[in-house]
Image (tube, coloured by chain):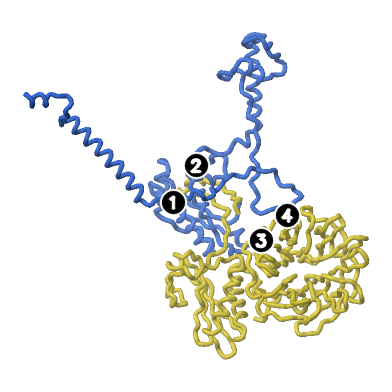
Chain colours: A blue, B yellow
Amino acid sequence: MTDSAVSHSLLVSRPTRLSRFLVASVVGHIALLLAAVLYARLASGPKVDLDARPIKASLVRLGKPRDPKLLPRKEQLPPPPKHVDAPKPPPDAPAPAPTKAAVAVPIPGVKPEPSTAPKPTPQKGETTGEDRRKRLFGAFDKTARAAEPEEAEGAEDGDPDGDSATAEGERYFGLLQSQVRRHYNVADTIPESERLRLNTIVAVRLGRTGEVLDVSLSKPSGNDLFDSAVVTAVRKAAPFSPPPEHLRETLQKHGVNLSFRPNAL
Amino acid sequence: MKALLLSLLLLPLVALAQAPTIEISGANFRPLPVAVPAPVAQNEGGRKLAPGFDTAFGFDLAASGIMQVLDRKSFTADPKEGMTAGSINFSRWADVGAEALVKVSLAQDGGVLRGELRLFNVATGREDLKVAKDAPADNAELLAHRLADALYRHFTQEPSPFLSRIAYVVKGGNNRDVYVADWDGGNARALTKGGINILPALSPDGSQVAFTTYRKGRPDIFAQKPGGDARAVVSEGQMATGASYSPDGKRIAYSLAEGESAQIHVANADGSGARALTDTPYGLNTSPTWSPDGKRIAFVSNRGGSPQIYVMNADGTGVRRLTFQGNYNQTPDWSPRGDLIVFTARDERNAFDLFTINVDTGKVTRLTQDQGSNEEPAFSPNGRLVLFTSNRNGGSQLFVMTSEGNNQLPLRAAKGFLQTPDWAPLAQAE
């Protein structure tokens, strides 16, 4: 009877599966926490010196162009980027506040709406709105047309060393050219008179993945230093980008001729 | 260098065995990486003289501006490797970045030091040059300059500056003396002994030096041959300074002060037949330098308010102002190549630095910057290098650099407080 009462009492804890799980879980978490604390203590991380002065880094603002009366300095700053004013947004740009739009876009010849009006109503109906849009887009077009030479600034997938604004001929050959050019280093010992006439043609065959299969001098210049410099340039530039499908066979079978001249054309 | 102009040219596929051709031009020019292992001594005499030879030879190549001498510590080749192509492991030299390999052997034969130089192309393993020279055994440096000159000529097909001579002033106590030395400052000999002797100018054939001396209390121009006696060229109580020989050596230009002005004069090399080329009352005209064809003279004048470089015909006509940048431009020296004049200028930070100006285009290029004061430039006989004074390491030292301002090195053997260098060709006996 007594045993039964004890066994049925709610005050007495009994080892159930849930309580065992809870105990194991709590012990496990504590162990993990301890392990983490111990690891953090034992593992030697870089000591942070809170007294150390932080290094302040800031980019120098692009200053005014140097006074032409002053003597030049070495490593001149790059010329300032061409300033192109952003065209004004058209009046029907998404979600402009009606009153603000009227103020923000002053159009000569078009009277602004009375300030009391909650919504701009075109005085001459739809045609006026159309005119206004045309005028604005016309101005935009003019800006765009005027800036055309500057806008041709290369392609999104262009090469950082590329100097052409547009792709001429086969884009892949342009890529080859820029890859070789990066390693096109020639000794200063070559006299200036020779620099004018030297020309070496190197034949290169490329594999499917752009690997160099074969490099040979198909027309040596007569100057060993120049010849070895251009062959080195090709070898250092390898491997090249994988050729496009339509060029693979040509590049593998016949290769490509790289015609080197020391001076800029 | 960076201004590369490349064009892509796709020839018809049939034309060249169906292989397209790409044109690549506009190379990056850089000094040739050269490996120069220590010279191989063939006998005991050669071994003794090798260090002196080696230092002078290494400096010639390093200061030439066209070669980059690689650090010997990086070499992996066998130090006992032979002198012939067959015995050289070229891959070892290629591994350390060498494109050319220079091997020298030395042997003393009585009073003569003989040297043999071989130049190899590391990529092809071919011997490109084999040359033998000799020099008196007490002048291993001369052999170094001769072999370095042969190497330089092989590459550039023009004479090197290594066999030329320089003159400069050494300040000691209250004295200023004129010295003449090899191009690297070696074998220096004092030309004057005591007193104030400044602004030396070597005659084009190197036979004599004109300089300004205060031996009579006022500045006069004297000329002297090494080992000879000084003789007055422009004297008689006039304030004459800064002589400059014409390229043919027959005339001198100098500045003559009278009252508050100084005018450029030209006379025969012996001082006869002098006449004034400039006539600016209250203006100072100084520091004349001749164009290599002898038809024009550049000089400094303050006629516009501040010292600037001017150019005129050698008869004094056609004066035109050359520099318009900076407000204190002085000590011009005309390049033997004709295109550039190098000069000292004070910039807006009050630093003295060296610049070149292209005589035709007026383009000014800065050569030195942010390294102390750099002054008194002089072109090498081939116009490729510029000698100048700098206080960047304290005192006043002689430095050499390329005419583009690269590779600035202190002269190997010139010691002391040195001023106003001049550089003239003096081909020593081969």
Q: Nearer the viewer, mark 4 or mark 1?
A: 1
In-image side of A153 versus B424 (left or right): left
Which residue is the site of mark 4?
B349
Q: Residue at x 65, y 67 (%)?
A: B393
SS class, disc 1:
loop
Most distant residue in the bottom direction: B110
Say which chain tag 2 marks: A
Query: As shown in the figure, which amino acid type bears the numbered disc 3?
Result: Gln
Give above or below for B257 relative to B4: below
Residue B38, horizontal then vertical, whole percent: 51, 76
As helix, strand or loop, the secondary structure at mark 4 comes to loop
Labels 1, 3: one chain: no
* Chain letter of the residue carrying label 1: A
Distance between mark 4 and mark 2 Cα atoms: 51 Å
Q: Are marks 2 and 3 in contact (CB under 8 Å)?
A: no
Q: Nearer the viewer, residue B190 or A40?
A: A40
Q: Which mark is residue A170?
A: 2
Discs 1 and 2 carry the same chain letter: yes
Along the polypeptide, which appears first: circle 4 or circle 3? Answer: 4
Q: Using the rendered image, report if marks 4 and 2 lie on a common chain.
A: no
Q: Is residue B300 above or below residue B76?
A: above
The amino acid type, in three-letter code, at marker 2 is Glu
Which dot, 1 or 3, sits closer to the camera? 1
Q: Which residue is mark 3?
A: B371
Tell me, yes or no, whether dots 2 and 3 are on the same chain: no
Callout 3: helix, strand or loop? loop
Q: Quadrant of the N terminus of chain A?
A: top left
The label shown at residue B238 is none
